[in-house]
Amino acid sequence: MKNEDLYQYILGIADNSLILGQRLGELCGHGPTLETDIALTNIALDLFGQTRSYYQYAAKLAGGVKTEDDVAMLREEREYRNVLLVEQPNTDFAFVIVRQYLFDEFHLLLMQELQNSKDEMLAAIAKKGIKEVSYHRRFSGDWVKRLGDGTAESNERMQQAVDDLWRYTDELFHLTKADREMIGQGIGVDVSQLRDTYYNTVTELLQEATLTVPEQEYFQKGGKEGIHSEHMGYLLTELQYMQRSYPNMNW
């Protein structure tokens, strides 16, 4: 391994997009309207496209014969570094939208800063993907306002989703060992410095959507260290099925 910390840092970013893209992919053909269904599918494809670039870079760092597919599909559950938020299931459309928005707001802040990375590859990926991430944030934010300030039922469902998912937001700003090493080298983004901006922006939008910000004292974490929720195993079973059933398969 040329640089273990850089490899782990890349996984910490890429795995979020992979797992959230997989969750959105589960909705293909099940959206509330045709337009929304296509939009969510396109967001999933955007995330997969971004994560592919990260995994190609990670495979190069790993050396040997490892490919982007090996990095994406053939790790054990404890080797994935995504936050718990993105692996939460598609309970209903309100949960899908709130989960998406809570991640998108963070993702946009991260990409804005990652463009300034001293690592040319990471900076290039961020510059290429930031327009897509900006659209994702606008799409999910508009839906939060539309449903939050909609009917009594839509407001109730959105508030339930916010209450249930809020506990996963603080993990977005935790720093792992790899994060600290890359920050020290000017490669990584110090996401802990983004916390206040994130919560101020999210709070403002939720209030505009007539939703109440939870008064959360305890936040759940563990995903960045490979300790995931019970949902992750089921998700990986579907994600990895083809690669594990037909090793080295070529189309």
Image (spheres, grey):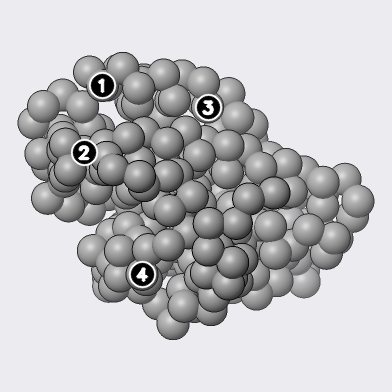
Please rate how many residues cluster around mark 4, counting C-alpha atoms within 10 Å: few if below 14, some from 14 to 19, many from 20: few
Which kind of residue does numbered mark 1 sit on? Asp
Residue 193 picture location, percent across and down: 22, 37
Q: Label 1 belongs to which residue? A: 119
Frontmost residue, 41 versus 156: 41
Which kind of residue does numbered mark 2 sit on? Leu
Distance from Cα at disc 4 to Cα at disc 2: 19 Å
Distance from Cα at disc 2 to Cα at disc 1: 10 Å
- Tally of numbered tags: 4
Q: Is residue 101 left or right of residue 71?
A: right
Between marks 3 and 1 in the image, the one whose residue lies nearer the viewer = 1
Frontmost residue, 72 versus 148: 72
Kindly state the secondary structure of the residue where label 3 is placed: helix
Distance from Cα at disc 1 to Cα at disc 4: 28 Å
Q: Label 2 belongs to which residue? A: 6
Q: Earlier in the sequence, mark 3 or mark 2?
A: 2
Which kind of residue does numbered mark 4 sit on? Glu
Q: Label 4 belongs to which residue? A: 76
Q: Quadrant of the N terminus?
A: top left
Location of residue 243 (image quadrant): bottom right
Q: Earlier in the sequence, mark 3 or mark 1?
A: 1
Marks 4,2: beta carbons within 8 A: no
Q: Label 3 belongs to which residue? A: 129
